[in-house]
Image (cartoon, grey):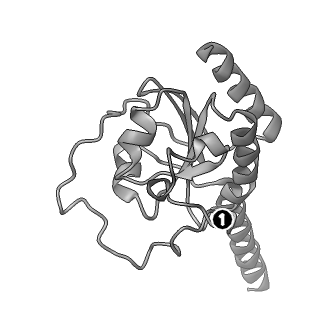
């Protein structure tokens, strides 16, 4: 009987450890490449109606206040910051942008998102005027995340001329810098 309990405890410990590792590195690794980038008009049934899942307003994954682009003169990309993108600003800020846009999909419960955000903020400062960097909170913008086929976070999606050109999951700083440098070189 004691071997049974020892195996059960060991199995439960392994499952708990695996769940912790998966929650740290993101939620799933599936890709969906067939995405309609022009969001259709949502009907009221598809709109997220619950306010309780939303984090405090104007707070990014790093806990810093982010100014709403609508309150800012001519957008924040000129200042070299990661802008918060919502369902209502997605078309203007991403699909109609004149420069490439790097968009991070994140949530407050995602630990790798907390690691990725400062790297994106540094890149936004380095590529001011050449590229735009934004972030979409999937908890507050569930309809948009669903339309774009976001199946795991953090997810970084690159848009050029209103079209998705690539997407990838959590990347280290050096790898992310190489990807952004490549995007910048191809845009010139």
**Which quadrant of the view contains residue 130?**
top right
How packed mark 1 is, by other alpha carbons closer than 10 Å (few <14, some 14-19, many 20 or more), is: few
- Residue 26, by quadrant, is bottom right
Asked whether, in this view, residue 43 is left or right of residue 157, the answer is left
Residue 78, can we see it?
Answer: yes
Q: Residue 140's x, y, as percent? A: 43, 64
Q: Residue at x 51, y 54 (%)?
A: 72
Residue occupying image coordinates x 40% and y 33%: 95
Q: Is residue 137 above or below residue 126?
A: below
Residue 143 % position (x, y): 33, 55
Q: Tell me the quarter of the image containing the N terminus.
A: bottom right
Q: Is residue 51 left or right of residue 31?
A: left
The outermost residue toward the right is 174
How far across and down, in percent of the image, does residue 139 sit?
Answer: 46, 64
Circle 1 SS class: helix
Q: Nearer the viewer, residue 129 or 121?
A: 129
Q: Residue furthest front?
A: 73
Q: Is residue 75 above or below residue 94?
A: below
> Residue at position x 78%, y 41% from top?
172
Q: Quadrant of the C terminus?
A: top right
How many numbered badges does the structure rendering display?
Answer: 1
**Viewer-side residue, 139 vs 29:** 139
* Residue 21 picture location, percent across and down: 72, 60
Is residue 171 among what the camera can see?
A: no
**For mark 1, what is the residue?**
19
Q: Is residue 186 left or right of residue 93?
A: right
């Amino acid at each position: 009987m004691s071997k049974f309990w020892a195996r059960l405890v060991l199995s439960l410990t392994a499952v708990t450890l695996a769940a912790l590792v998966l929650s740290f590195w993101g939620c799933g690794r599936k890709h969906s490449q067939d995405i309609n980038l022009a969001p259709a008009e949502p009907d009221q049934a598809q709109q997220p109606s619950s306010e309780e899942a939303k984090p405090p307003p104007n707070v990014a994954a790093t806990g810093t206040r982010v100014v709403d682009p609508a309150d800012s003169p001519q957008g924040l990309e000129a200042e070299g910051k990661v802008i918060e993108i919502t369902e209502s600003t997605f078309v203007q800020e991403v699909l109609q942008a004149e420069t490439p846009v790097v968009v991070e999909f994140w949530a407050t419960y995602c630990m790798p998102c907390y690691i990725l955000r400062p790297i994106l903020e540094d890149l936004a400062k380095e590529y001011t005027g050449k590229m735009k960097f934004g972030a979409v909170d999937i908890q507050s913008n569930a309809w948009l995340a669903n339309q774009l086929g976001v199946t795991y976070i953090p997810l970084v999606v690159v848009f050029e001329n209103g079209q998705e050109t690539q997407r990838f999951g959590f990347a280290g700083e050096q790898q992310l810098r190489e990807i952004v440098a490549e995007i910048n070189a191809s845009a010139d």
